[in-house]
Amino acid sequence: MSLASLVMASSFPRCEIRQLAVYVYPGGIKAHDAERHVVFYGRRGVPVKKPRFIPAQLAHQLARKLQARRLGTVAVL
C-alpha cells in the first residue's frame, strides 16, 4: 500500500448517517434566483418538518425512488 493511498483514505471521512432533502421549484424553473422549497424526508420515506438523520444506505435507496417520481431535485446531504 502506497503513502498516497493512505493519505487519500484518511482525508475523506466516511459518514454512515445522512439527511435526505428534495428541492421543489413551484414555478417549474430551476434558475439561480427562482423560488424553491426544501422538503426533508425521514426513515419511512415521508416528509418531516425538521431534518432527520437516517442511515446512508436507506437515504440513497429512498433518493432513487423519489428521483423516479420527478418531484424536484433530490439531494443526500
Image (tube, rainbow, N blue to C red):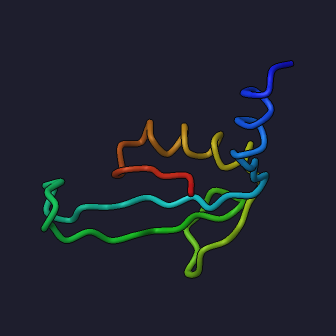
Give the farthest residue toward the right. Answer: 1
Q: Is residue 1 left or right of residue 61?
A: right
Q: How many marks?
A: 0
Query: For residue 45, which quarter of the picture?
Result: bottom right
Q: Quadrant of residue 4?
A: top right
* Left or right relative to 41: residue 11: right
At x 70%, y 46%, the residue is: 11
Front residue of 1/31: it is 1
In the rendered image of this protein, does residue 9 appear above or below residue 76?
A: above
**Residue at image location 16% in from the left, 61% down from the top:** 32
Residue farthest front in this picture: 3
Q: Is residue 16 left or right of residue 24?
A: right
**Foreground: 14 or 61?**
14
Farthest bottom residue in view: 49
- Residue 29 found in image quarter: bottom left
The residue under the point 18% across, 54% down is: 30
Q: Is residue 3 above or below residue 56?
A: above
Q: Relative to residue 22, is residue 57 depicted above or below?
A: above
Task: State the image coordinates of residue 21 (x, y, percent, origin top left).
Answer: 50, 61
- Please tell me whether residue 6 is drawn above or below residue 75 in the rendered image: above
Quadrant into which the N terminus falls:
top right
Kindly give the residue lying farthest to the top in the view shown: 1
Q: In percent of the image, x 76 and y 47: which residue is there?
A: 14
| Residue 70 % position (x, y) | 35, 43
What percent of the width, then of the height, locates residue 61?
Answer: 65, 40
Quarter of the image with the C terminus in it: bottom right
Q: Can you give x and y, in whole percent of width and height, for residue 47 in the image?
A: 55, 68
